[in-house]
Image (tube, rainbow, N blue to C red):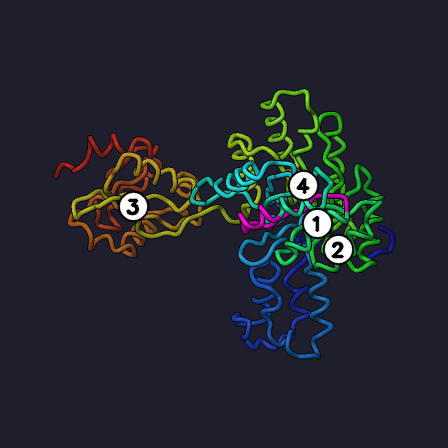
Amino acid sequence: MGEKEIKKSIRELSPLDIYMLLPRTNCGKCGEKNCMAFATKVVNREVPIEQCAPLIEEDKYKSEYTRLREILAPAVKEIVIGVGENAVKVGGKLVMYRHEFTYYNPTPIAIDVTDEMPENEILERVRGVESFTYNYIGRTLKLDMIAIRSTSNNPDKFKSAVEIVAKTTKLPLILCTFNPEVMKAALELVYERRPLIYAATERNWKQMAELALMYNCPLTVFAQNNIELLKSLVKTLLEYGVEDLLLDPGTFPENGLSETITNFTMIRRSACKGDDRLLGYPLVGVPMTVWLRRDAPKEVLQWKEACLAALLMARYADLLIMHSLEGWVLLPNVVLRFNLYTDPRKPVSVEPGLKIFGNPNEGSPVMFTTNYALTYFTVESDIKSANIDCYLIVVDTGGISVESSVAGRILTAQTVADAIKKSGIEEKVKHRYLIIPGLAARLSGEIEELSGWRVLVGPRDSSGIPAFLKDKWPPKET
């Protein structure tokens, strides 16, 4: 990098770096006891720097505020597409590798329609996007955007298709055409919804830049398999005044797949490791390019699109444009997206406390589990599918599973006893029998001593709960 000053990565940035640029008055206006505590939360991205009132309100801290914004700026700029509650954020990445910190802004998935489709087909696809939902460990997974492509190259046809989509859905839009005249016709109609303009190229960059500035919309920069040209276009557009940019280096299935993955990886590496500001923008992947091949069976193309989408998502794509609406194509990718964008520092968890299933009474069984999301929702599913009326105490283990939390001494007899008292279950049932997970059997004796409840060691797997209750409940008095 020569003598160029490289911004510290999130792993190298310490609370002291932030603290030295704060007012250091310990005024408490941020909600913390002192400035060092606030600096620690800022480094961990738990609070925004703007929460420091003196830093924002007093002119004497203007230079410090500017410097803080510079060092806290993500390696990949965050861009907003759309408006209001339906807007999506792309980019905003702080690190190249998820395990270094965490990823923000899950990759939006857009499904395409074209201006040569019949109106009923456009409506069917849009409604298919809106209706696609899947509940995964308590989270609703869904699709995010509609990409409208001009295959006719006709301004009137494109405008008509955009109008149909805009009236049908409030989802954010991507307008896809290389023809500035066609793009302008659509932007005049929906610019207030801040759609993504796709795309500026070596040939049309000036006209597209003028449209982006005129209508205040983000702009995709496209340079097919040419990173140097991509950088040159970005530099030119920035000098022209366009700041909200996304990058598309081209998506090549089949023989060009290795070049595609290499380009995406090198662009993100340059932004995160080399502090290359010209490449520090969200990446657009287009898995639907597999459909350019006309001679393959439909199912083969769908399978290839699903695989390509997963590859691109794992290799830094911040936005995907797809064609297939089949569940078996989309479901693996929305689940993969969820898992990629969970915080590796914090296991996925649910709120601890007392959960009630069915219509339990004072003689209904009482069980407990941990607040690890996958464990809880598995237990919940098994209880609901068997139509069991019961109480379930969810113990706070910081989102750790039963076996791991017992081994790590996070789940102890004392935490279980405390959870019983806090839940208020003693006021809801007359008996004092607690069914514990089989994997926590070693805690049974101590739980009885500390809580005063009799313990029944349940099955190791929640699928065995129905059979266990049928055989063991109500318990025989001894």
The answer for how far apart the CA atoms under marks 3 and 4 are is: 51 Å
Alpha carbon distance from label 2 to label 3 = 57 Å
Distance between the alpha carbons at the discs numbered 4 and 2? 17 Å
Q: Is residue 306 above or below residue 26?
A: above
Task: Report which residue position mark 2 lands on.
Answer: 211
Answer whether residue 85 is visible to the viewer in this image: yes
Of circles 3 and 4, the one toward us is: 4
Q: Nearer the viewer, residue 68 or 185?
A: 185
On the rendered image, what quadrant is the C terminus found in? top left
- On the image, the x and y values in percent for residue 407 come to 42, 40
Label 1: element kind? strand
| Residue 468 horizontal/vertical position (percent) | 24, 32
Which residue is under mark 3? Answer: 392
Q: Amino acid at mark 1?
A: Ile
- Amino acid type at circle 2 is Leu
* First to last magenta residue range: 163-179
Q: Residue at x 80, y 57 (%)?
A: 238
C-alpha distance separating marks 1 and 3: 50 Å
How crowded is the residue under tag 4: few (<14 C-alpha within 10 Å), some, or many (20+)?
A: many
Disc 1 or disc 4, which is closer to the eye?
A: 4
Q: Is residue 173 magenta?
A: yes
Which residue position is annotated with label 1?
197
The answer to whether residue 339 is seen in the rendering is: no
Residue 253 % position (x, y): 71, 29
Tell whether label 1 touches label 2 (CB within 8 Å).
yes
Amino acid type, callout 3: Leu
Q: Label 4 belongs to which residue?
A: 149
